[in-house]
Image (tube, rainbow, N blue to C red):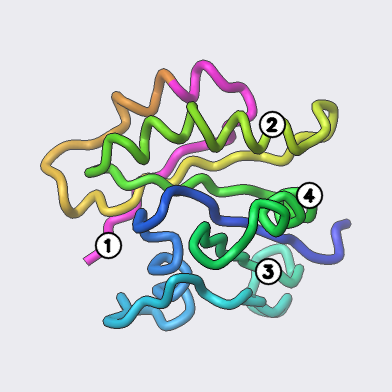
Amino acid sequence: MRKDVRILLVGEPKVGKTSLIMSLVSEEFPDDVPLRAEEITIPADVTPERVPTHIVDYSEAEQSDEQLYQEISKANVICIVYSVNNKKSIEKVTSHWIPLINDRTDKDSRVPLILVGNKSDLVEHSSMETILPIMNQYSDIETCVEVREH
């Protein structure tokens, strides 16, 4: 059994990565959101698998490419966050994030990828019809979730 789990959140600026982490910690949507959240550690006694879980936020504005590559190599799971109301952030899932992660991970031991559609409260429709072709094209993607922020 794994001694801990490391979850990395990546995505374009302003898609809500930090807000998701801050909302998880405080159980409410934050008024002031920093560029990047500090690494969060969820203790083993509050996780279903009884394993400490580290949640790591990536900020292009505050971190170098080398820091991103190091975090990718340490991650057990990578969440690619996109904003459902930002077409560019959805396009970057396939044009930038998936290729970058695949280039930086060993083909035989790729980490699970989870697509996280954020800000679904800002649109009238689901983005699933846009994301399903991406999920079908890339077998590395484990699942896709839409997150409603308010």
15 to the left or right of 122: right
Secondary structure at badge 2 equals helix
Residue at 47%, 34% in the rendered image: 93
Q: Amino acid at mark 3?
A: His
Secondary structure at badge 3 equals strand
Secondary structure at badge 1 equals loop
Residue at 44%, 60% in the rendered image: 17
Q: Amino acid at mark 1?
A: Glu
Name the residue that disc number 2 marks: 102
Q: Earlier along the polypeptide chain: callout 1 or callout 4?
A: 4
**Could you classify mark 1 by the number of other residues whose Cα lies within 10 Å: few (under 14), some (14-19), or many (20 or more)?**
some
Name the residue that disc number 3 marks: 54
Name the residue that disc number 1 marks: 149
Q: Earlier along the polypeptide chain: callout 4 or callout 3?
A: 3
Relative to 61, does residue 96 appear above or below in the rendering?
above
Residue at 74%, 72% in the rendered image: 52
The front one of 10 and 149 is 10
Q: Earlier along the polypeptide chain: callout 1 or callout 3?
A: 3
**Could you classify mark 2 by the number of other residues whose Cα lies within 10 Å: few (under 14), some (14-19), or many (20 or more)?**
some
Q: Could you say which quadrant of the image residue 58 lies in?
A: bottom right
* Span colored in magenta: 134-150
Q: Amino acid at mark 2?
A: Asn
**Could you classify mark 4 by the number of other residues whose Cα lies within 10 Å: few (under 14), some (14-19), or many (20 or more)?**
some
Q: Does 17 lie within the magenta span? A: no
130 to the left or right of 92: left
Q: Earlier along the polypeptide chain: callout 3 or callout 2?
A: 3
Q: Amino acid at mark 4?
A: Ser
Q: Using the numbered discs, state the Cα–Cα distance from disc 4 to disc 2 in whole angstroms.
A: 11 Å
Secondary structure at badge 4 equals helix
Whether pointer 3 and pointer 2 mark residues with C-beta atoms closer than 8 Å, the reply is no
Q: Using the numbered discs, state the Cα–Cα distance from disc 4 to disc 3 in whole angstroms.
A: 14 Å
Name the residue that disc number 4 marks: 73
